[in-house]
Image (cartoon, rainbow, N blue to C red):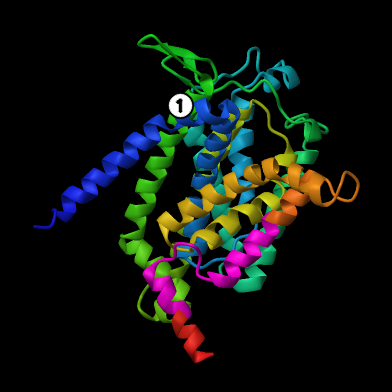
Amino acid sequence: MSADPKLKARLGIALIGVALAVLPFVVGATFGNSWVRIVDFALLYIMLALGLNIVVGFAGLLDLGYIAFYAVGAYLYALLSSPHLATAFPALFAVAPGWPVWAVLPLGALVAGLFGVMLGAPTLKLRGDYLAIVTLGFGEIIRIFLNNLNAPANITNGPQGINNIAAAQIGGHALNRPLELFGVMVPGVHLQYYFFLALTLLVVFVCVRLQDSRLGRAWVAIREDEVAARACGINTRNVKLLAFGLGATFGGVAGGLFAGFQGFVSPESFGLLESVMVLCMVVLGGMGHIPGVILGAVLLALLPEALRWGAVPVQQSLFGKVLIDPESLRLLLFGIALVVVMRWRPAGLWPSALRKRELAAHGEAA
């Protein structure tokens, strides 16, 4: 007799849960805690990719300025969780604000969501390349704005950034400090991992519910044919604004986590290359497919660091010490890997069944 499919699914979920629970200890013991930090960043990229997947994968709206919402969440967290405002405006802030994480993260998500609606409102009639150019400009405007908002009032400290940002605290314990549990000393980078993992699972749950909801089906209808969707009674204006707003909300949450994790933010962290990287995660994994987007985010977060390790011996053996540096070789290998994958897997590494059928139909028509 074959096993019950529900039992097999529950067993698989349990095994995945155990693997995720022990992952930081295995990685730390094998490669060192520096790789646990890389895994933490991979979780942040998963949240970013899932947020962009709502805009690009579900609704079919090409957004090249998504990293702006990441910056909004990061800077809001930095301003509310560092002594910068008290130093810049001593008359208004006698002490550092030090807001709790359960208040500042939702506030950052809300503000980032409002910025997403602000971006979506003037672009409702744009699609394709025109929408991409407008969103690209929006992302650059936010970065330049943060870079220059140090005169006359030193709000963002300009290109020098904001430092001394307090890490997230749970139960009065800062997550960047080690904690002893049952006689075992858990490093701070491990505590950050579990905090990020909990929020990532929450984002995944919300995305799954959205995909299976009436709103998710409306997004897919707009992606397939906006004119037909409007003819079927879908309010395309509100639905597209919701896509921009919800996607930006997840970006704001990830930005706040990034600021607390790094303890420092500056405009250099939110350039165009970051937006392109997150978009590559969505496209490479499989647009509109949540497991595929997660796979793409993990691969593109870990692959550059793995190539960084392998670039040095390859550079020394092939090119010597003059012609090319390891960082350039890492980017070269990374680009080649992307081109090869997209050449042979245009739908992504793990596309949805619907996406595969769409590409097959387009190929037959061509």
Residue found at the very far top of the displayed protein? 183
Q: Residue at x 63, y 61 (%)?
A: 338
Q: Residue at x 59, y 53 (%)?
A: 278
Displayed quadrant of residue 38 = top right
Q: Is residue 344 visible?
A: yes
What span is colored magenta in the figure? 334-359
Residue 180: x and y in percent read: 43, 11
Q: Is residue 198 above or below residue 114?
A: above
Magenta residue check for 318: no
Q: Residue furthest toward the right?
A: 322
Residue type highlighted by circle 1: Phe
**In x, y percent, where is residue 226?**
47, 77
Q: Position of residue 123 (x, y in %)?
A: 60, 65
Q: Name the image quarter holding the N terminus.
A: bottom left
Identity of the residue furthest to the left in this view? 1
Q: Is residue 225 visible?
A: no
Residue shown at the point (75%, 41%) measured from the top left: 268
Residue occupied by mark 1 = 25
Depth check: give the residue in front, 126 or 277: 277
Q: Is residue 322 above or below residue 127?
A: above
Please tell me whether mark 1 sits on a helix, a strand or a loop: helix
Above or below: residue 67 compared with residue 292: above
Q: Quarter of the image containing the C terminus?
A: bottom right
Tell me: 224 left or right of 261.
left
Does 201 appear above or below 125?
A: above
